[in-house]
Amino acid sequence: MSSRNTVVRSLHDLGAAAWFGGSLMGAVGVNGAAAAVQDPKERAKIAAVGWGKWAPVSFAAMGAHLIGGAGILKANRGRAKHQEGVTANTVTKLVLTGAAVGATFYSGALGAKTAQGDGHSVAGATEPTAATPDDVAAAQRQLKYLQWALPILTGAIIVLGSQQGEQQRSTQVLAGLGSKLLSRAGD
């Protein structure tokens, strides 16, 4: 790969930004709007339609981030192996990315379950009422927490990406390589 990786970095960063922003907007905007609908029997439908419109964009953002991340990892594999701190950051970011992918798919499955509440009274997208069917209410209770886990996970991914950018400063590269060499010499 060339020394410039603008396309894969852009895919990585824009994908993460869209994934983060969309999940946060959904938790605040879509779910908030659904809760404000006058008829409690329409709330589940409104939330399901909103999240359904976002789903293809979310998957595209997630895919762009994953493709970009793979490209960056390939381009920087030597630095990731030899510069102190880069391996830990990369492993942490991979774990968080896996958790975010899992949370995205699980949220989608729970969202499909809550959509079955269409026509039943719900207080909001993630808040059941006594009249909400039990399986829908159970999915809503899980989504109440999961809706915030996704922006937290994707936000942490963005922060780690920023840290990786800082690790590429020439002073950081030299210090990290030196520390890694000294630790290997001591082994």
Image (cartoon, rainbow, N blue to C red):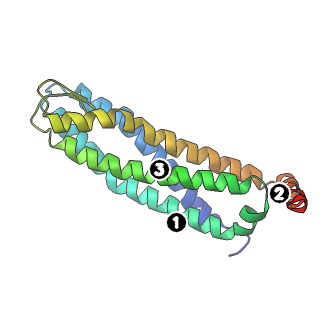
* Category of crowding for the residue at label 1, using alpha-carbon neighbours closer than 10 angstroms: few (below 14), some (14–19), many (at least 20): some
If the image is split into quadrants, where does the N terminus sit? bottom right
If the image is split into quadrants, where does the C terminus sit? bottom right
**Residue 67 - label:** 1
- Disc 1 secondary structure class: helix
Q: Amino acid at mark 2?
A: Val
- Distance (Cα) linking label 1 and label 2: 25 Å
The disc, 3 or 1, on the residue closer to the chain's N-terminal end is 1
Q: Is residue 4 visible?
A: no
Name the one closer to the observer, 125 or 49: 125
Residue at label 2? 173
Residue drawn 56% across the image and 58% down it: 12
The disc, 3 or 2, on the residue closer to the chain's N-terminal end is 3
**Residue 99 - label:** 3
Q: Amino acid at mark 1?
A: Ile
Name the one closer to the observer, 14 or 105: 105
